[in-house]
Structures are given as C-alpha cells and as structure tokens.
Image: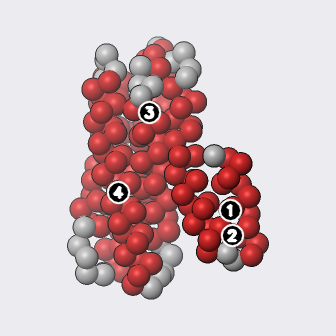
Amino acid sequence: MLSVYGPSAGMAAVFDSSAAAGVAGIAGVPLAGYTGVLVAATAVPAWQEASVTMPLLFTASGVAGAASLLELVPSDDRTAQVLRRYGIIGKVGELGAAYALEREVSDPAPYRGTRLWNVAHGLTSLSLVLSLPRRRNRRREIVAALTGAAGSAAVKFAVAQAGVASVS
C-alpha cells in the first residue's frame, strides 16, 4: 500500500496530476486502517480483542476525518458533492465499526463506559446529520466538517484511553 501511495501522492503534488491523485486517494484508504492493524496486534487487551473491527474503525474514521478536513476548503458544487458523499460513507462506516467493536470485545466498558467514546460518536453523528441535506449551505458544511474532524480525532483518543483503562 505504501509503495503505491507514496510515489503517487508525490507525483500528484509535484506534477498536479489528477490521475496520480486518484491513485493516491484509493491507496490511502486501506493505508488509513493500517494503524488499526498495528494497534490490534499489541498485548493491550482492549485492543487485541478488537483485532477484526479495529482496522475497520481506523479506516472509516480516516475517511470521515479526511473528508471533513477537505470540506473546510471552499470548492465548487461538484467537488463538494463528491466530498459530501465520501464523508457520509466514512461517518456511517465509523459509527458502524464502533458498534461492531463494542460487540467484538468481551468487556466493552473501556470503550462504551467513557465520556470521550460517547462524545466522539455524538460529534460524528451530528456531522452525519448535518451532511445529509443535498442543498448547499456553507455554514452547515463548515459545522459538519468541524464536528466530523473532531469526532474522527476523538475516536482515536478514545481508543487510546480504552487501552490504558484495560491494562490498569
């Protein structure tokens, strides 16, 4: 993944190539989940038990976060529509993967029982709801983008917090 992503992202940046950017974008999606693979491969009980869903959570959260950050940049209607759809897929995926993770682990308390985990899903859910209307409204798009980016970041901090709680 990295051997495809790195050169294509570099070509896209240097040569302003939309084809290279497309390849980098596609290769970047599974690359976003690789951190989840590494986290789940540790001896931390809350992470190790989530070895199936952790990479999915990180991938979906990466998609949601990337789309949210890109939505902060002013864009034409077509680009905004693509980002909106991409973000909706990521946000739905993040919420679904988090739900599946809670079902996968034997003790979901290090996740479900924390304020940060709940705040992360609240932010992502709010961002999803704000992203659903097709009619463009720049203020709504910005709020959706900010809450989506915050939710994506918060879910990763919540996973870290769950890991610490599970070894204490």
What's the CA distance linking mark 3 and mark 1?
Answer: 25 Å
Q: Amino acid at mark 3?
A: Met
Q: Nearer the viewer, residue 134 or 27?
A: 27
Name the spot of residue 72 as percent of width and height, x first.
47, 72
Mark 3 or mark 4: which comes first in sequence? 3
The answer to whether any part of residue 150 appears in the image is: no
Q: Which residue is mark 4?
A: 89
Mark 3 or mark 2: which comes first in sequence? 2
Mark 3 or mark 1: which comes first in sequence? 1
Q: Amino acid at mark 1?
A: Ala
Which numbered disc covers residue 54? Answer: 3
- Report the side of 8 relative to 112 (left or right): right
Which of the 4 image quadrants contains residue 67?
bottom left
Q: Nearer the viewer, residue 36 or 18?
A: 18
- Report the side of 19 relative to 77 (left or right): right
Q: Nearer the viewer, residue 12 or 40?
A: 12
Q: Residue at (33%, 37%) from the top-left corner? A: 98
Mark 4 or mark 1: which comes first in sequence? 1
Secondary structure of residue under mark 1? helix
Residue 38 to residue 33: above or below: above
Which of the 4 image quadrants contains residue 24?
bottom right
Dots 1 and 2: beta carbons under 8 Å? yes
Q: Which residue is mark 2?
A: 12
